[in-house]
Image (cartoon, helix red, strand yellow):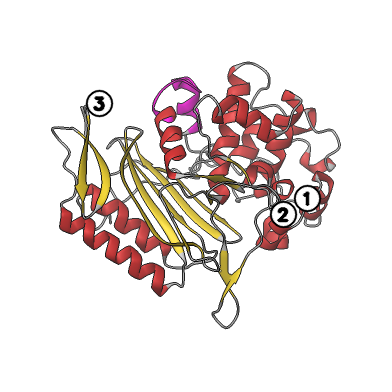
């Protein structure tokens, strides 16, 4: 395991790409050939999967260690991806929603074991006993509206009543607390609870509590009508393999379940904040990163907005993927190594991205394979 990182940051040039290396006696950057191979392989993977563009970033103790953009942010205008490009991140948004809930719990404004009916009295009766904690852990049993309507649901302006109606069109998956099933509806409802407690929109809550304090100036929720500097266009393939445009996500259709936009530099600021107690104390962060358990004791390997499966056999990992119309993203934190990884691409349903992610992580772990 890597320990004792120095805070001294030195600039180095690797294969023509500006990277930052934190001076550490027990960590060495991958050599130039390894970095070059990583870049070539990633570029080849983008071409293989018909992905217009992407960006990879590596963080060490919240500082950018390495960053490299690839391909096009806008195919029609021939605009390249840059280090400042802003991508949609889909379900990675959930960890910000969960953090807001935890901040309110730490302040005593809500309790994690409160039934959600306490805050949202107009919900279907069978949903009411589910708790805030169960929503965050995907153990509420409330059906996933995205699964019912597909990713296309995010293209439309929807009211909360419409989202609830979609989810309520299917019976409960199980009684609250008795099972585990990933549900975007749960995080939509969490967003509504935060709004009810704070008496303002979720985007205003996150801006005031997280984005502004951390100076995450390129992070916000999607809005097709807004002028967003450095915004990347999202794409998909049609049935004959042709690249097509995808509508940006509508905020009202997802709230805190997905649809946020951010940049590599802003994610470094978020990564740094997670290392300290600026937003949440150690006790609350530890709970956020504790796996949920089923009644029989089985661990779900999911915390509050975080996947908690280990990476390989020896690496503790806190991760989440994100996929929304036009985009795929992946964020991984390996806390024992002090390393984090971010991958953005501007294509939806690009199978095979997992291989590129593993190559990125393995290159900076100096391993050939994690498993």
Q: Does residue 77 lie above or below 115 as drawn?
A: below
Depth order, front residue of 163/68: 68
Q: Residue at x 19, y 57 (%)?
A: 34
Gap between marks 1 and 2, in whole Å? 7 Å
Q: Which mark is residue 145?
A: 2
Magenta stretch in the rendered image: 274-288
Percent coordinates x, y for residue 227 in the rendering: 64, 47
Gap between marks 2 and 3, in whole Å? 45 Å
Gap between marks 3 and 1, in whole Å? 47 Å
Q: Which mark is residue 7?
A: 3
Q: Is residue 167 left or right of residue 350?
A: right
User: Mark 1 = which residue?
Assistant: 163
Quarter of the image where the N terminus is located? top left
Q: Residue at x 27, y 46 (%)?
A: 18
Which class describes the residues within 10 Å of circle 2: few (<14), some (14-19), or many (20+)?
Answer: many
Q: Label 1's element?
A: helix
Residue 159 lies in the magenta-colored region: no
């Amino acid at each position: 395991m890597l320990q004792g990182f120095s805070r001294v940051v030195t600039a180095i040039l690797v294969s023509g790409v500006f990277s930052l290396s934190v001076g550490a006696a027990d960590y060495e950057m991958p050599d130039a050939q390894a970095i070059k191979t990583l870049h070539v392989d990633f570029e080849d993977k983008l071409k293989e999967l018909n992905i217009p563009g992407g960006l990879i970033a590596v963080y060490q103790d919240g500082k950018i260690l390495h960053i490299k953009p690839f391909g096009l942010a806008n195919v029609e205008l021939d605009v390249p991806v840059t280090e400042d490009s802003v991508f949609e991140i889909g379900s990675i948004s959930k960890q910000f929603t969960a953090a807001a809930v935890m901040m309110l719990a730490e302040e005593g404004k809500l309790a994690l074991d409160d039934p959600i009916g306490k805050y949202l009295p107009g919900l279907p009766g069978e949903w009411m006993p589910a708790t805030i904690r169960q929503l965050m852990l995907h153990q509420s049993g409330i059906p996933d509206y995205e699964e019912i309507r597909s990713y296309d649901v995010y293209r439309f302006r929807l009211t909360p009543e419409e989202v609830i109606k979609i989810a309520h069109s299917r019976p409960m998956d199980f009684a609250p607390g008795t099972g585990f099933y990933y549900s975007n509806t749960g995080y939509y409802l969490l967003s509504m609870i935060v709004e009810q407690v704070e008496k303002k929109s979720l985007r205003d809550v996150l801006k005031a509590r997280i984005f502004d304090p951390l100076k995450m100036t390129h992070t916000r929720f999607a809005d097709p009508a807004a002028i967003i500097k450095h915004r990347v266009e999202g794409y998909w393939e049609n049935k004959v393999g042709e690249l097509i445009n995808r509508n940006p996500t509508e905020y009202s259709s997802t709230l805190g379940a997905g649809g946020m936009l951010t940049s590599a530099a802003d994610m470094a600021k978020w990564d740094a904040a997670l290392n300290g107690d600026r937003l949440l104390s150690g006790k609350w962060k530890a709970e956020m990163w504790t796996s949920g358990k089923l009644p029989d004791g089985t661990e779900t390997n999911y915390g509050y907005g975080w996947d908690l499966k280990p990476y390989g056999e020896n690496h503790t990992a806190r991760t989440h993927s994100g996929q929304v119309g036009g985009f795929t993203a992946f964020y991984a934190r390996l806390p024992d190594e002090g390393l984090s990884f971010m991958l953005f691409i501007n294509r939806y349903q690009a199978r095979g991205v997992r291989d590129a992610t593993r190559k990125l992580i393995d290159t900076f772990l100096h391993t050939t394979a994690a498993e």
